[in-house]
């Protein structure tokens, strides 16, 4: 049935009205937070870090050394080997005839000064772990996502840089695996593999970075609350996202100071791998667009690497014109993404293989079958 | 000399087929004569009647950027899975070395290879003042018939001239006039297009 | 047999038409290469069709091709190709004859000839067209051989080259023997070259000498040398050309001189030569009343055929005497007296006497002429001489009508007589005679035709070896019945619609020929029509000049050097 528009109409008006009010509130909030940030900049770094560390379970930014209310521009361009990795997955569904889990990972490699087309590699793997039988053992979506994250780092690690060029390795999304701790037989080994991959990247001296396009993170806001009130913001109170604050601070192309990420999982990363981040305005003068960039400690500690990363990201975003986003990441996504018809085709092939093995009578659920009924046709 | 594959068949019917090739490849020019072997002894001939390069959201977005890096251009041409599609209008076939200007008995199949015809083949196909195949061009729907004729006549005319038959172009033009003289509104624009070939 | 098609000039192919609406030939050559009146040959499988081009029409596959010049939109070569296929000229051909072809296959050809030689098969002759050629049959401009095949070879006896085909100069012959078998006509408006044409044709007839020719030369043009009115050059007369032994000039009236020259002898009429019917023929000229025949009949009854004229002439008009009572009464030698005596209306008799006074005073009518000059003329004609009767100073219609009628009446009587004698086995075969009548409409118009001897000759005298050659500028004035009897018609330019209509009366395809007549080039071109020619044809008439006379004298037939003509036309 279609939507009940009569009922929705007043709700839409109400929604818009509330949004306008919220925006006013946000502006006021931002002004205040900016003032606090300026105030905070005058404080010694260690004082601030200690204040925050007092609340070690809070997700919070820690000043890493740079002046927190400043922005940093980059100039010039440097040749580098830019890697972008992305992955996609097929999550098994109980309704499918044969539930299938798959991870597809792609790597796009570009020598930024060569003028040559990037080199692309794709790796596809069916996840098979079904002691109870193929049609009943379903891998959880979280686990598959985790496996995909690991695979993305693995494919970056597998890259053999043939040049002497500095290497920047980009992936889409945060470097920190998950906000809340995960436990379980299957999660721990994957996490360990993830950390191992990061360590390999550190050894290879690849400048790893996670690009987060529309971050809702409130870590700096939290830091300012702790600094100003001595307490983190109560859970029930909504904090202003960091990107909103940065919109007022960063000019186009400018980045924020680098902060260290404090979270419950920080301790698992160790000194070298600890996650840092900064914000970057990839927009235009008339339209700021703030993204969050997460980097491991080995990159955060090297200003040259940070500047090179900043230049590369800005350049990549420029390619995409009016909707800035790193071109290479988009290409990695394009190469990795598994479309519905491809999934269908894969499932048919699998079904065929199963039938070849004498395994018959795999049918989709009745619910799915009903959904797939042909729509009305015309004579 | 080994023939180079210029594309592979995507879809076909009795009258035409669509062939895809990577954009980076030097694909045949509009109006070129191409051949698609069906078997050891049977070849279908066609003319490139349309060359289609699809866009997608990314290309559209890239086009809005103030400048596009060469690497990005190359990436879109070499890596992105968007083939150049060529509509090939069937104009005849060759069976046991005998050329016919009738439509092929059966169309080629998916992923059959398409080759660009050599000057020698072009002359062979268009030889002998036989212009029956021109009707396939004139009857074709959804292709710019006038320009296709012009492009083909320019190429075949040059090939024939190189082999000493400088009257070929005029003979072909005369045949087109014969076929279309009862259709003034169609014929005149075609002749004007041919005039551009002459003047070129 | 006809020449092979290869030496003809291909001009197109048949695309349509029929016997009624003529044939349509789509030209493959520029229209200027074919002209109205051209002699066209169509090669259609086993038959040749011969016809005459009567019209040329510009056509287009689509009118838009014609409306917009292609060269404005296209380069020269493409425009040429386009025009070649979309614009064309339709030649309208009036089909006239068809002739069976000999087979192309050598064996069949041999068998064909053998069959003809053995008499198993008739030798093919041109037949009046009864069918039509097939679609796309090739059409050619006739070659010299075609013209000869149809109109006769110039070198053959009896054939006289009257002119040449318009485009290619092939000689066209008229068969003189056929020409004299029936009456003929030469028509053309003033200045169309009629006199030259007549001179030439007469020269041909005299040279051929198969018939005697009597020319009523009203304007003294034919016998002696003349000066051309347009060029001022000397034009040779027939007597100058052939000499007095063959052609004699007869002058009207005793002591008559023709352009200052003395004629061979003079024609003088005696009173007794004039018969009442001769007078009746002058009804219009003398404005005679309806009572005239009655009066003339009474005169004949009173005085006899030989003396009526003298008697009537000597009667006095209005003479009276007093009678015993002192009353004035008609004198005995008066017209009135005679009328009263014979019971004729006095006024009618006196009226006729008044009107005949013009005749009574003609100097060439004598009571007792020194010789019977009419008989002399007839004798000369019978002996094979040719007579040009020059009217000298007597150029009035009255003189012309009277003398020509009278003489012709006598000739008719004489030729009927000798023919009948010949047919009854008592005499020699009469020599054919052609009487040439100028200003024919004066003698053969609707009012007079029924009475004059001329119409009788035109209708019946063929049987008696006498035919007419009628020369006129107003054929419309000539009685239809006479016109329909004219076998051969040679037409120069005619402007008047009625004249054109009359000249073409009784002929097939006259609608197609009509326009052609009005577009003939004066003094240059004539159209040959009628029974005497196998089919209508337009010819550029032969020049009547010194060369003509040289050819005639040397007996050289024009057209013998046709090989040269062919060489000139087809240098390759």
Image (tube, coloured by chain):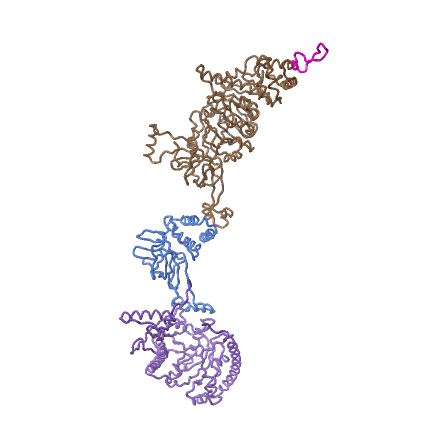
Chain colours: A purple, B blue, C brown
Rendered location of residue C425, percent (x, y): 43, 15
Residue C249 in magenta?
A: no
Taking the view exactly as shown, the residue that stands out farthest to the right is C326
- The correct choice, above or below, for A140 with respect to C108 in the image is below
Which quarter of the figure has residue B71? bottom left
- The correct choice, above or below, for A196 with respect to C91 in the image is below
Quadrant containing the N terminus of chain C in the rendered view: top left
Q: Using the rendered image of the protein, determine whether residue C425 is visible from the camera's viewpoint.
A: yes
Report the number of discs: 0
Q: Using the rendered image of the protein, determine whether residue C245 is visible from the camera's viewpoint.
A: no
Residue C332 in magenta?
A: yes
Pick the residue in front: C38 or C418: C418
Q: Tell me the magenta residue range.
A: C314-337
Rendered location of residue C289, percent (x, y): 62, 21
Taking the view exactly as shown, the residue that stands out farthest to the left is A358
Rendered location of residue A249, percent (x, y): 50, 80
Pick the residue in front: B130 or C410: C410
Which quarter of the figure has residue A149? bottom left
Left or right side of A356 for C302: right
Quadrant containing the C terminus of chain C in the rendered view: top left
Pick the residue in front: C225 or A145: A145
- The correct choice, above or below, for C397 with respect to C147 in the image is above
Rendered location of residue C86, percent (x, y): 46, 46
């Amino acid at each position: 049935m279609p939507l009940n528009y009569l009922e929705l109409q007043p709700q839409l008006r109400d929604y818009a009205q509330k949004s306008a009010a919220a925006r006013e509130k946000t502006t006021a909030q931002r002004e205040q937070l900016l003032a606090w940030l300026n105030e905070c900049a005058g404080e010694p770094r260690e004082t601030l870090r200690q204040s925050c560390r007092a609340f070690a379970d809070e997700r919070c930014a820690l000043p890493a050394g740079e002046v927190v209310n400043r922005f940093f521009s980059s100039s010039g361009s440097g040749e580098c080997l830019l890697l972008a990795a992305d992955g996609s997955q097929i999550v098994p569904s109980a309704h499918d005839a044969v539930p299938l889990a798959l991870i597809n990972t792609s790597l796009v490699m570009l020598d930024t000064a060569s003028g040559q087309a990037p080199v692309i590699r794709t790796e596809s793997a069916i996840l098979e772990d079904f002691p109870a039988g193929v049609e009943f053992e379903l891998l959880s979506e979280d686990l598959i996502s985790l496996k995909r994250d690991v695979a993305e780092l693995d494919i970056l690690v597998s890259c053999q840089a043939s040049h002497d060029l500095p290497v920047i390795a980009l992936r889409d999304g945060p470097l920190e695996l998950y906000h809340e701790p995960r436990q379980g037989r299957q999660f721990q080994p994957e996490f360990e593999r993830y950390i191992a991959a990061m360590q390999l990247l550190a050894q290879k001296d690849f400048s790893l970075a996670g690009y987060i396009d529309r971050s809702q993170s409130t870590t700096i806001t939290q830091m300012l609350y702790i600094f100003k009130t001595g307490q983190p913001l109560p859970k029930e109170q909504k904090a202003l996202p960091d990107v909103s604050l940065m919109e007022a601070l960063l000019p186009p192309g400018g980045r924020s100071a680098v902060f260290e990420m404090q979270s419950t999982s920080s301790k698992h990363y160790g000194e070298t791998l600890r996650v840092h981040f900064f914000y970057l305005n990839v927009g235009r003068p008339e339209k700021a667009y703030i993204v969050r960039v997460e980097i491991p400690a080995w990159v955060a500690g090297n200003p040259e690497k940070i500047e090179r990363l900043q230049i590369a990201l800005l350049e990549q975003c420029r390619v995409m014109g009016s909707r800035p986003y790193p071109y290479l990441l988009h290409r990695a996504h394009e190469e990795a993404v598994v479309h519905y018809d491809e999934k269908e085709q894969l499932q048919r092939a699998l079904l065929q293989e199963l039938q070849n093995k004498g395994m018959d009578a795999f049918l989709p659920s009745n619910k799915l079958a009903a959904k797939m009924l042909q729509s009305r046709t015309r004579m | 000399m080994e023939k180079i594959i210029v594309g592979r068949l995507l879809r076909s019917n009795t009258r035409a087929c669509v062939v895809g090739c990577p954009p980076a490849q030097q694909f045949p020019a509009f109006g070129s004569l191409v051949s698609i072997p069906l078997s050891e002894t049977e070849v279908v001939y066609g003319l490139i009647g349309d060359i289609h390069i699809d866009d997608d959201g990314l290309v559209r977005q890239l086009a809005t950027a103030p400048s596009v890096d060469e690497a990005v251009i190359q990436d879109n041409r070499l890596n992105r899975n968007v083939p150049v599609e060529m509509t090939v209008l069937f104009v005849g076939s060759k069976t046991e070395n005998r050329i016919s200007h009738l439509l092929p008995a059966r169309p080629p199949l998916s992923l059959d290879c398409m080759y660009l015809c050599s000057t020698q083949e072009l002359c062979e196909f268009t030889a002998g003042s036989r212009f029956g195949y021109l009707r396939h061009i004139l009857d074709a729907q959804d292709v710019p018939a006038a320009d296709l004729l012009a492009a083909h006549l320019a190429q075949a005319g040059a090939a024939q001239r190189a082999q000493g038959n400088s009257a070929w172009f005029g003979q072909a033009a005369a045949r087109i006039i014969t076929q279309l003289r009862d259709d003034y509104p169609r014929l005149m624009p075609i002749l004007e297009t041919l005039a551009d070939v002459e003047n070129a | 047999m006809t020449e092979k098609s290869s030496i003809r000039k291909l001009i197109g192919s048949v695309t349509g038409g029929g016997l009624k609406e003529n044939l349509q030939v789509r030209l493959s050559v520029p229209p200027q290469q074919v002209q109205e009146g051209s002699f066209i040959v169509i090669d259609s499988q086993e038959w040749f069709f011969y016809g005459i081009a009567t019209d040329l029409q510009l056509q287009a596959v689509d009118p838009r091709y014609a409306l917009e010049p292609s060269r404005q939109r296209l380069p020269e070569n493409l425009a040429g190709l386009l025009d070649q296929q979309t614009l064309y000229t339709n030649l309208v051909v009036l089909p006239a004859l068809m002739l069976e072809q000999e087979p192309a296959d050598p064996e069949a050809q041999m068998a064909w000839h053998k069959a003809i030689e053995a008499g198993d098969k008739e030798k093919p002759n041109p037949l009046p067209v009864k069918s039509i050629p097939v679609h796309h049959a090739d059409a050619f401009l006739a070659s010299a051989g075609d013209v000869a095949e149809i109109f006769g070879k110039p070198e053959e006896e009896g054939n006289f080259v009257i002119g040449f085909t318009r485009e290619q100069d092939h000689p066209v012959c008229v068969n003189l023997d056929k020409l004299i078998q029936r009456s003929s006509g030469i028509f053309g408006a003033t200045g169309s070259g009629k006199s030259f044409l007549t001179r030439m044709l007469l020269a041909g007839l005299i040279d051929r000498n198969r018939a005697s020719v009597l020319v009523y030369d009203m304007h003294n043009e034919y016998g002696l040398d003349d000066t051309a009115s347009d060029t001022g050059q000397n034009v040779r007369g027939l007597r100058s050309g052939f000499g007095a032994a063959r052609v004699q000039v007869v002058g009207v009236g005793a002591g008559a001189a023709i352009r200052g020259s003395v004629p061979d002898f003079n024609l003088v009429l005696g009173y007794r030569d004039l018969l009442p019917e001769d007078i009746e023929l002058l009804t219009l000229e003398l404005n005679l009343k309806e009572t005239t025949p009655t009066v003339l009949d009474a005169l004949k009854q009173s005085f006899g055929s030989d003396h009526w004229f003298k008697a009537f002439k000597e009667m006095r008009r209005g003479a009276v005497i007093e009678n015993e009572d002192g009353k004035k009464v008609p004198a005995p030698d008066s017209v009135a007296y005679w009328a009263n005596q014979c019971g004729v209306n006095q006024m009618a008799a006196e009226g006729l006497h008044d009107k005949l006074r013009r005749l009574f005073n003609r100097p060439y009518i004598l009571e007792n002429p020194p010789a019977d000059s009419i008989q002399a003329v007839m004798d000369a004609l019978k002996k094979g001489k040719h007579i040009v009767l020059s009217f000298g100073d007597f150029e009035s219609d009255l003189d012309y009508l009277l003398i020509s009628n009278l003489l012709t009446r006598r000739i008719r009587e004489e030729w009927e007589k000798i023919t009948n004698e010949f047919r009854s086995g008592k005499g020699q075969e009469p020599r054919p005679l052609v009487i040439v009548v100028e200003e024919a409409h004066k003698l053969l118009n609707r009012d007079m035709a029924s009475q004059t001897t001329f119409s009788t000759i035109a209708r019946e005298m063929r049987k008696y070896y006498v035919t007419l050659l009628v020369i006129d500028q107003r054929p419309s004035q000539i009685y239809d019945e006479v016109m329909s009897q004219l076998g051969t018609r040679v037409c120069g330019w005619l402007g008047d619609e009625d004249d054109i209509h009359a000249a073409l009366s009784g002929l097939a395809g006259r609608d197609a020929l009509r326009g052609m007549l009005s577009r003939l080039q004066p003094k240059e071109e004539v159209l040959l029509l009628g029974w005497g020619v196998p089919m209508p044809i337009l010819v550029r008439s032969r020049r009547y000049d010194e060369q003509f006379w040289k050819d005639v004298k040397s007996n050289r037939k024009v057209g013998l050097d046709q090989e040269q003509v062919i060489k000139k036309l087809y240098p390759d």
